[in-house]
Image: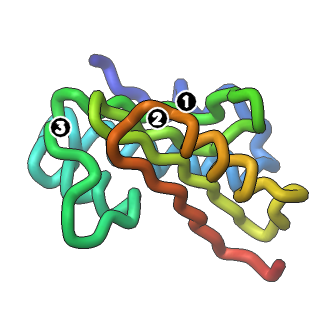
Amino acid sequence: MALNVFASLAKYSAASEENYLIESLVFLVRLLLDRAPAAGLEFANLLCASSGVALLVDSASVIIETQVTTEVGRPDIVIKSPEALAYIEVKHDSPLGIDQLERYHGHLQQEGAARKQLVLLCRSRY
């Protein structure tokens, strides 16, 4: 896979710091999974806030996407594998939407993955 952070960032306005942060973070995780699978898997598990038992177990099966549209909204980052699913919402000086995390949590509960995680990463005044 050809990894290019500039191609990922080009779809956003330069004024959109939050989206730049999200795409840069995802680029880094994908790069690690590609070039240093063990480190990439460890970092992806840290990002998924999995403690104790790893949420993700095989770096080759991990898929990371940004801005995935679901029936209940658009999580910033979706990390999935055959056995796991994580929604990660990133906030950079912006508030959460009305019931945003509750909607994502409810949607996760309906998904078939054995292990599920909802994470909020924020650097925010809100």
Q: Position of residue 111 (x, y in %)?
A: 51, 33
Query: Which element type, helix, strand or loop, lies under badge 1?
Result: helix
Q: Which residue is drawn at 21% across and 57% down?
A: 54
Q: Which mark is residue 32?
A: none
Q: Residue 8 carries which label?
A: 1
Compare marks 3 and 2 and give the one earlier in the sequence: 2
Instruction: Say which amino acid is labelled 2.
Output: Val
Q: In this view, does 98 lie to the left or right of 82?
A: right
Q: Where is residue 3 in the image (x, y as percent from the top left)?
A: 35, 26
Instruction: Say which amino acid is labelled 1.
Output: Ser
**CA distance for labels 1 and 2:** 5 Å
Compare marks 3 and 1 and give the one earlier in the sequence: 1
Specify the color scheme.
rainbow
Quadrant hosting residue 98: bottom right
Quadrant hosting residue 112: top left
Query: Which element type, helix, strand or loop, lies under badge 3?
Result: helix
Q: Which of 62 and 102 is in front in this view?
A: 102
Quarter of the image with the C terminus in it: bottom right
Q: Are marks 1 and 2 in contact (CB under 8 Å)?
A: yes
**CA distance for labels 3 and 1:** 21 Å
Q: Mark 1 Cα within 10 Å, few/some/many (few <14, many 20+)?
A: some
Relative vertical location of residue 25 with respect to residue 61 in this rendering, above or below: below
Q: Residue at x 31, y 19 (%)?
A: 2
Q: Name the residue under label 3.
A: 59
Q: Mark 2 Cα within 10 Å, few/some/many (few <14, many 20+)?
A: some
Q: Nearer the viewer, residue 38 or 48?
A: 48
Query: Which element type, helix, strand or loop, lies under badge 2?
Result: helix
Instruction: Say which amino acid is labelled 3.
Output: Ser
Q: Name the residue under label 2.
A: 5
